[in-house]
Image (tube, rainbow, N blue to C red):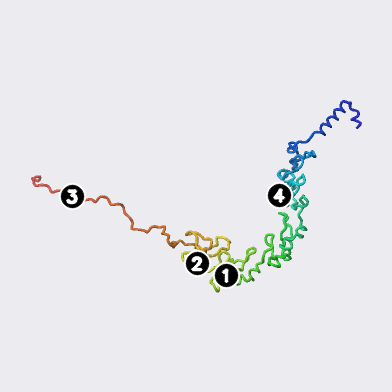
């Protein structure tokens, strides 16, 4: 204040005029669109009544640095906020520090305590935190054993972050005894080997003693001209024999049966022509007998 009073009167008047000019200058839409606040916080539109820059579109928010860093990608109440868990999940703070949950317009950290109070902990056993992907999952036997899915569906062991059925469920189940589905694959009981089939009622009563495509089939039910492939083409559970037979000759069908190509389908002509006698070169014109030389005449011998 002392320094200001010590300035010449002309300078004081000039500074005052400069301040009034800057204070009365109105913002424009273009200034907001090119401002630092637009790039950082999505404040790219002008509120003409209040004379301030605001966020009015999700597009402006999604282009901002605060969206990439903090998950504030949704426009609400003239500013950018975290509008959903998806906003938080794509942000840097989620991927690096676990700020993946949306609460009151902000992204907050996900913790094991959060997982333990969720309904999925009680029903599916997802009570632990995967700290790599920041999602709730089942991480040990206790998570599964105390869940509804274990008590009701016998999914009581952990595999890849989820509760699945145990091997014992398949080995002691009714489907093993009747159909030979005695081996476990994730949450399904399947026939993984011929040994699964041979002890089943399906083998004893129906001759279905060979394991193909996760089930037991009867090798004698294979149509003439077809044979079992040595290895299943896929892990699917399709019918071992389709109504229309196998695919093209010499290829593996989707049912685990191969067409050997020895027999043509009804109405199908053989692709190889019948072998005939070997044709020799075309004969040329017949040659006549060679003329014998005439004996010398008597006059020539005299």
The Cα atoms of the two marked residues, 3 and 2, are separated by 74 Å
- State the image coordinates of residue 6 (x, y, percent, origin top left): 91, 28
The residue that appears at 71% across and 59% down in the rendered structure is 137
Of residue 161 and residue 244, the one placed in the foreground of this image is 244
- Residue 183 at x, y percent in the picture: 62, 67
Q: Mark 1 points at which residue?
A: 197
Residue depth check, mark 4 versus mark 1: number of the one nearer the observer:
4
Q: Counting other residues with Cα less than 10 Å from the Cα at mark 3, is it few (<14), some (14-19), or many (20 or more)?
A: few
Pointer 3 residue:
291
Mark 4 or mark 1, earlier in chain: 4
Q: Earlier in the sequence, mark 4 or mark 2?
A: 4
Q: Outermost residue toward the front?
A: 49
User: Which-is-in-front pick, marks 2 and 1?
Assistant: 2
Asked if marks 3 and 2 touch (Cβ < 8 Å), the reply is: no
- Per the image, label 3 sits on a secondary structure element best described as loop
Q: Which of marks 1 and 3 is nearer the N terminus?
A: 1
Q: What's the mark number on residue 222? A: 2
Q: Is residue 143 left or right of residue 261?
A: right
- Vertically, is 171 above or below 57? below
Which residue is painted at 42% across and 61% down in the image?
267
Could you tell whether 82 is left or right of 218 in the image? right
Cα distance in 3D space between marks 2 and 1: 17 Å
User: Which residue is identified by label 4?
Assistant: 90
Label 1 Cα neighbours within 10 Å, binned few <14 / some 14-19 / many ≥20: many
Question: Mark 4 falls on what kind of element?
Answer: loop
* Placement of 11 over or under 244, stated as above or below: above
- Position of residue 285 in the picture relative to residue 54 (left or right): left
Q: Where does the C terminus fall, quadrant-wise?
A: top left
| N-term-proximal mark, 3 vs 4 | 4
Q: Is mark 2 on a helix, strand or loop?
A: loop
């Amino acid at each position: 204040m002392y320094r200001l009073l010590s300035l010449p009167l002309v300078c004081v008047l000039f500074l005052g005029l400069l301040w009034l000019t800057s204070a009365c200058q109105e913002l424009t839409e273009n200034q907001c669109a090119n401002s630092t606040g637009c790039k950082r916080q999505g404040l790219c539109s002008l509120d003409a009544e209040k004379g301030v820059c605001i966020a009015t579109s999700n597009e402006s928010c999604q282009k901002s640095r605060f969206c990439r860093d903090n998950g504030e990608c949704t426009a609400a109440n003239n500013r950018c906020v975290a509008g959903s868990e998806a906003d938080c999940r794509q942000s840097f703070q989620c991927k690096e520090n676990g700020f993946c949950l949306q609460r009151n317009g902000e992204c907050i950290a996900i913790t094991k305590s959060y997982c333990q109070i969720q309904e999925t902990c009680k029903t599916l056993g997802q009570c632990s935190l995967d700290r790599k992907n920041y999602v709730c999952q089942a991480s040990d036997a206790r998570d599964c054993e105390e869940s509804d899915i274990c008590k009701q569906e016998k999914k009581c062991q952990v595999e890849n972050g989820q509760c699945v059925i145990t091997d014992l469920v398949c080995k002691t189940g009714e489907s093993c005894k009747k159909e030979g589905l005695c081996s476990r694959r994730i949450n399904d009981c399947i026939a993984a080997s011929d040994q699964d089939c041979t002890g089943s009622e399906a083998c004893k009563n129906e001759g279905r003693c060979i394991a193909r495509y996760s089930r037991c089939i009867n090798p004698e039910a294979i149509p003439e001209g077809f044979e079992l492939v040595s290895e299943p083409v896929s892990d699917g559970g399709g019918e071992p024999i389709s109504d229309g037979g196998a695919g093209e000759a010499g290829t593996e069908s989707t049912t685990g049966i191969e067409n050997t190509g020895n027999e043509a389908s009804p109405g199908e002509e053989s692709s190889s022509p019948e072998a005939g006698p070997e044709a020799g070169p075309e004969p040329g014109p017949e040659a006549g007998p060679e003329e014998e030389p005439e004996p010398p005449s008597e006059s020539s011998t005299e």
